Amino acid sequence: MGNHQSKQILDNKANAIERTKLALSVLLCSVVVSASCFLVGCVSSSVEDPTSSGSSAFASEPADSTAAKLSETAAKPTAHESIPRAPIDNPIDFEMLISQNHDVYAWIFLPGSSVSLPVLQHPLEENFYLDHDMHAAESAIGSIYTQFVNKRDFSDPVTVIYGHTFDEWSDLKDEMLGTLHLLEDKAFFNCHPYFYIYTPDRLLTYQIVSAYEYDDRHIVNTFDFSKKRVVQEYFDYVVNPDSPSRNVRKGARLDAAKDKIVQLSTCTRPANDSARYIVTGVLVDSRALQKKA
C-alpha cells in the first residue's frame, strides 16, 4: 500500500482532506468508543446504532437520517440461511454515486468506526484507486477499492478490499480504513461483531471472525482459490492466525464448501511496508434492497 509516512502526504494533507470530502460526499465524524462496554451484552447484540458511533453515510440526505436508516436496514443476521424477505429501502444513493463514477459498485459500513465509504473497482488498473479519489482525481488519501481479480458481486470465496491507514499522530488517522485498528482492542472487537456491504440491490452482512497482522503477500494471487482444499487451508489459518497481534471470534469456523469471506486489507500502525492489517468477515446474511426513491 506504500509508505504512508511520506513527506508528500503530510505536505498535501490539507488539500487532500478537502478534496476527498467533496469527492466522496461523506461527512466523516469522530469515533466515540465507550470504555465501559459490557462484553457479554455487546457480543449478543447483532445490530449497532451508527448514530452512537459517530459514523455517517452518503451526504445526499442529513447524516442522522442516513445513519438511522443504516441501522434499521442492517437487521439481525442468521448464519448460513437464505430466507426470502420483502425488499427494504436502500439507504445509499447508488444512482447518484454511479452517475459520478461508474467504478462505484458497493458501500461498506462498520458500526462504531468512520468506515462508511463507497467501494470502487477500476476495470483496467488494479491499484488505480490507491491514489485517486471517487472522481478519479489524484488524491493522497485514495479510495476504498477492490482489484478486478475479484468479482463485483462478492461471490468469490475470498474478496479483498483495500484502503489506506495513516499513522496515529497524523490528522488523517481516521480517514479511509484507519479506524479498522480499533479492532486491535479486544473490548472493541467483542462489541462490534459485524460489518455491512450495500450494493444497489443487496445488503450483505458479514460477521467479523478475526483481525490480525499479516505479511505483504498479494492474497488472491498467492493462493489458488479455485481449489477447495486451498480455500479450506486458508480459512483454517484465518480463524487461527499465527500473528502475535490478533483477535479471533470465539468458536469461529469457516467451511470452504459454503462460506465466502471479505478481507479488509490496510497498513499496520505504526506503518510497516512488509506487513498488513487484515480484518476478515464471513457472509452470514444477504437480503434484497429496493432502489433509493
Image (cartoon, rainbow, N blue to C red):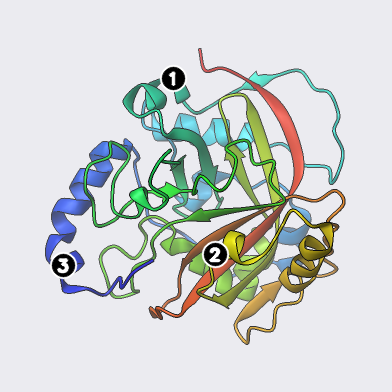
Of the numbered discs 1 and 3, the one sitting upstream in the chain is 3
| Tally of numbered tags | 3
Q: Residue 95: which disc?
A: 1
Marks 2 and 1, Cα distance to the nearest angstrom?
Answer: 36 Å
Residue at the image point whose x is 57% and y is 67% from the top? 278
> Residue flagged by tag 2: what amino acid is it?
Ser
> Residue flagged by tag 1: what amino acid is it?
Glu
Residue named by callout 3: 8
Horizontal side of 154 relative to 13 (left or right) equals: right
Q: In this view, does 275 lie above or below 94?
A: below
Image marks 3 and 2: residues in contact by CB distance under 8 Å: no
Regarding residue 236, the answer to whether it shows in the image is yes
Q: Residue 228: which disc?
A: none
Residue in front for this viewpoint, 60 or 161: 161
Q: What x and y, as percent, mark residue 290? A: 62, 17
Horizontal side of 8 relative to 259 (left or right) equals: left
Residue at the image point whose x is 54% and y is 72% from the top? 217
Q: Is residue 196 above or below residue 231?
A: above
> Residue flagged by tag 3: what amino acid is it?
Gln
Of the numbered discs 3 and 2, the one sitting upstream in the chain is 3
Q: What x and y, as percent, mark residue 253? A: 84, 64
Judged from the image, the secondary structure of the residue bearing numbered disc 2 is loop
Q: Dot 1, crowdedness within 10 Å: few (<14), some or many (≥20)?
A: some
Residue named by callout 2: 34
Residue in front for this viewpoint, 112 or 195: 195
Marks 1 and 3, Cα distance to the nearest angstrom?
Answer: 34 Å
Residue at the image point whose x is 35% and y is 29% from the top? 101
Regarding residue 76, the answer to whether it shows in the image is no
